[in-house]
Structure formats: C-alpha cells, structure tokens
Image: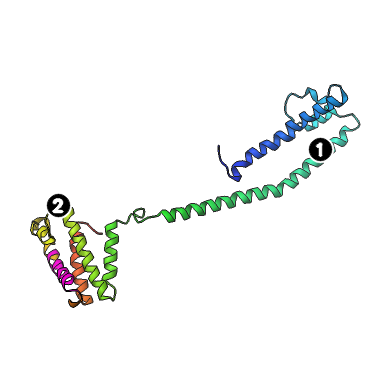
Amino acid sequence: MPGDQTLIGALPSGFEFFGDLLFKWVPASVIAVSQSVSGSESPYSMLTDPVSAVTVPSLLAQTSAPGTYDALLGAWYTWTVLSFALSIPFLAVVIYTFIRIMQIRTAERRAVAAAQRTVAAEDVPRTQLRWNRVLDQASSSSPEGWRLAILEADIMLNELLDLQGYKGETMADKMKRVERGDFNTIDDAWEAHKVRNRVAHEGSAHELSPREVRRIINLYERVFKEFKYIE
C-alpha cells in the first residue's frame, strides 16, 4: 500500500533494497574494482541485465576457469540451500508477526467501535431511554424515586403536547385545546397530570404506594404509545 509506514508495508521496499544490493550493486562494484586493479576488461563487463539466482550458474560458466567451475557451482548450490533453510525461520517470524498485527488491529477496531457505539448508533431513541429511566425509578423501592418518575413522565407529556402542536402557557391550557377525536387518551393524560401536580406541590406529604405509582405510570404509557412516542 503506497505510503504505508507499518512493518508490513515496509517489507516490499526492504526486499527490493536487498535485491538491488545483492544482484545489482555488488556485481557492479566487482566489475569496477576488477577493471581498476587488472587494467583489463572484466569478464563481467558483458553483463547487460541484473544477475538473478537462476542465472548464477550460467554466469559462473562464462566467467570461471574450467577447473574451478564445478567447485564454484557446488558451492553456489550449497549456499542456495543453506540460505533457503536459514530463511525459513525468518519467514515464519514474518508470517507470525503479520498474523499478530492483523489480530491486534482487529481488536483495536473492535475496541474503537465499542467506544464509539453511542445510544443513537444502537438505534435506541433518546425518548425511549428517558422512558426506560422513568420505569427504573418507578420500580424502585424509594418514594423519592417514585416522585421523580412521575415528574419526569409529566415533562415528557408536556413535550409530546408541544410536538402535537398544542399551544398554551401551562399544560392544562394545552390539554384544553385537545380535540378528543384526535387524542383518545386525553382523560388518562388529565388524570396523570393531576397526580403530578399533587406530587409537585405537596412533596413528601403526598403519600404514594407502589401500586399507585404503577397505575399513574401506566396512564402516561398509554398516552405515549398512542402517539408512538415510545415503543
């Protein structure tokens, strides 16, 4: 990948560098040195293409003395086998490193995705979350939690009335503008709102029971579900 600064991305460039070093620069240096020392044309001066591992035997046949060709060729094959054998562990390390890097990157992507997975990304509407908190408070054993659940549910009811286009200074003003044919659960909304007013004005003096709290929350729930405000 162009511009990849990772270890894996550097491998092709590294192999290309060592290939140039072994099969281009070294032969060229040998030619230059042999010509400068001997003052005669080097046997390598006829080379027009880079030397590769496959062409080394033919190169030896052209440049070596008849008595040394077999020894050089045997040494070359021995060196090739040894190089291949020595490269296997390094190749295994490269493969293992590549696999580990991929595993680490996968784990990192999952961690980032988990950190960025917001409520919206999970397709849970904000209103539904608020309602879930109301239900949690209503099902608690704390009278204070019960009062908070009713107050929050009434705030949601007020917002629903605004969304439906009802105008007024207070919630009572908004509900008075409701046409019953357009709002089937308006009586439930009125009853729940009246309890909310007693809770808000009387505070802890207005006693609540778990059964009464569930009943009031169910009234709000029927209103919200009529307009698909919650699931």
Q: Is residue 96 left or right of residue 150?
A: right
Q: Residue 8: horizontal and vertical position, in percent?
A: 60, 44
Q: Is residue 47 left or right of residue 101?
A: right
Which image quadrant: the N terminus?
Answer: top right
Crowd rating for badge 2 (residues with CA inside 10 Å; few <14, some 14–19, many 20+):
few
Q: Which residue is mark 2?
A: 165
Residue placed most toward the observer, 10 or 64: 10
**Dominant SS type (magenta):** helix
Q: Is residue 39 magenta?
A: no
Residue 62, quarter of the rendered image: top right
Crowd rating for badge 1 (residues with CA inside 10 Å; few <14, some 14–19, many 20+):
some
Q: Earlier in the sequence, mark 2 or mark 1?
A: 1
Residue 124, quarter of the rendered image: bottom left
Residue placed most toward the observer, 195 or 215: 195
* Amino acid type, label 1: Trp
Q: Is residue 52 visible?
A: no
Query: How was this image coloured?
Result: rainbow
Q: Is residue 46 left or right of residue 181?
A: right
Q: Residue at x 18, y 59 (%)?
A: 158
* Res. 11 mark: none
* Amino acid type, label 2: Gly
Q: Residue 180: horizontal and vertical position, in percent?
A: 8, 58
Vertical placement of residue 215 versus 171, above or below = below
Q: Residue 165: horizontal and vertical position, in percent?
A: 14, 52
Q: Residue at x 68, y 47 (%)?
A: 91
Q: Secondary structure at mark 2?
A: loop
* Res. 76 mark: 1
Q: Residue at x 12, y 60 (%)?
A: 170
Q: Is residue 49 left or right of residue 208?
A: right
> In the rendered picture of this protein, how many numbered marks are placed on residues?
2
Q: Magenta stretch: give its range.
A: 189-203
Q: Outermost residue, right direction?
A: 67
